[in-house]
Image (tube, grey):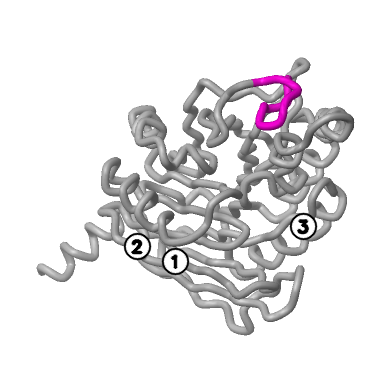
């Protein structure tokens, strides 16, 4: 199934909205993807703070149902595994800050940790690609990371957030990042089937050079797991990055999903009501298939 991935253009969007609280469900009759299309699911998912076990349980359910609806690639929000808790540390002071800093460092998980291995096994079972946001521990440092897992259950690679909205100061004062919290410096591109995918995390979308560097490195589509700001500004950021680079961009946040086609047109801006969780399924056709269709019409 994943072998059909190729250079891409966004052509079809379907969304499944749920009326309940923390729970995802497949469409009663999932739409059929066009021939040769890639099915990508963005999970508008609100993780529980500090609770990797609970989030693993809920993500497992959501990913399984997205795959049942035909997803080949699933993208979670930023920090989906642990609930994106760095701001809790940044805002704290005194003894509470030290307590949360210790808890933050303990919560971070290495790339070969038990929760990551769970999702490796899940991807292997379901034969899908997954982009999972989590707090990574590596050699005494912590990173805001998105790991890319392939359908064989192997880790294809990871992207570490390169730009922080709160700045880069480290220390023990209110407003400082935890001493271990470190930004990434690389802009890798990942083979997802026969397509090449770049990842940028949250605030990175507001820095044009991030998307530009990804495309310079070969990205044909960009995904943007996020947690912070939601709302109208994301339409502009995602549209601008797509138009500047000429590749589709998918933004996935606990409260919103935005899709922009390669020419910067907004194909979707999904904002479920409070208490709802949503799976947005995007069908993407290879450029070669689109060109073939155009040629057939000419004939």
Q: Residue 102: x, y in percent?
A: 87, 28
Q: What quarter of the picture does the N terminus occupy?
A: bottom right
Which disc number belongs to residue 266?
Answer: 2
Q: Residues within 10 Å of mark 1 (few under 14, many from 20)?
A: some
In the image, taking residue 130 as reference, residue 86 lies left or right, namely right
Image vertical order of residue 38 relative to residue 197, above or below: below
In the image, taking residue 93 as reference, residue 254 lies left or right, namely left
- State whether residue 253 appears in this view: yes
Magenta stretch secondary structure, dominant: loop
Q: Residue 71: x, y in percent?
A: 58, 61
Marks 1 & 2, CB-CB < 8 Å contact? yes
Label 1 – label 3 distance at C-alpha: 25 Å
Label 2 – label 3 distance at C-alpha: 29 Å
* Residue denoted by label 1: 269
Q: Residue 255: x, y in percent?
A: 59, 62
Residue 115 part of the magenta segment: no
Q: Which residues are magenta?
A: 170-179
Residue 176 part of the magenta segment: yes
In the image, taking residue 53 as reference, residue 171 lies left or right, namely left
Q: Residues within 10 Å of mark 2 (few under 14, many from 20)?
A: some
Seen as rendered, the residue at the extreme top is 139
- Point out the tag, 2 or 3, that comes first from the N-terminus: 3
Q: Residue 264: x, y in percent?
A: 29, 54
* Residue denoted by label 3: 60
Q: Residues within 10 Å of mark 3 (few under 14, many from 20)?
A: some
Q: Please name the residue shown 89% across and 30% down the image.
A: 95
Q: Who is closer to the viewer here, 278 or 195? A: 278
């Amino acid at each position: 199934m994943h072998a059909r991935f190729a250079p891409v253009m966004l052509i079809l969007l379907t969304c499944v909205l749920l009326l309940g609280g923390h729970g995802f469900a497949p469409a009663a009759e999932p739409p059929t993807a066009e021939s040769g299309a890639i099915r990508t699911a963005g999970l508008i998912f609100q993780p529980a703070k500090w609770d990797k076990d609970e989030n693993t349980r809920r993500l497992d359910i959501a990913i399984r149902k997205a795959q049942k609806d035909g997803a080949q690639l699933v993208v979670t929000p930023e920090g989906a595994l642990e609930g994106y808790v760095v701001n809790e540390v940044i805002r704290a002071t005194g003894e509470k800050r030290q307590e949360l800093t210790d808890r933050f460092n303990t919560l971070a998980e290495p790339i070969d940790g038990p929760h990551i291995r769970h999702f490796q096994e899940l991807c292997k079972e379901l034969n899908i690609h997954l982009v999972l946001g989590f707090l990574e521990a590596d050699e005494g440092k912590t990173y805001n990371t998105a790991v890319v897992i392939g359908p064989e259950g192997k880790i294809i690679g990871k992207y570490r957030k390169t730009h922080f909205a709160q700045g880069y100061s480290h220390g023990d004062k209110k407003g400082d990042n935890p001493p271990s919290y470190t930004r990434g410096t690389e802009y890798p591109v990942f083979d997802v089937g026969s397509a090449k995918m770049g990842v940028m995390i949250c605030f990175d979308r507001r820095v044009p050079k991030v998307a530009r560097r990804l495309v310079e490195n070969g990205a044909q589509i960009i995904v943007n797991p996020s947690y912070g700001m939601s709302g109208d500004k994301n339409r502009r950021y995602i549209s601008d990055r797509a138009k500047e680079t000429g590749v589709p961009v998918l933004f996935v946040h606990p409260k919103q999903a935005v899709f922009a086609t390669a020419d910067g047109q907004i194909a979707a801006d999904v904002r479920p009501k409070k208490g709802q969780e949503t799976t947005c399924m995007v069908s993407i056709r290879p450029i070669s298939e689109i060109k073939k269709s155009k040629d057939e019409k000419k004939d």
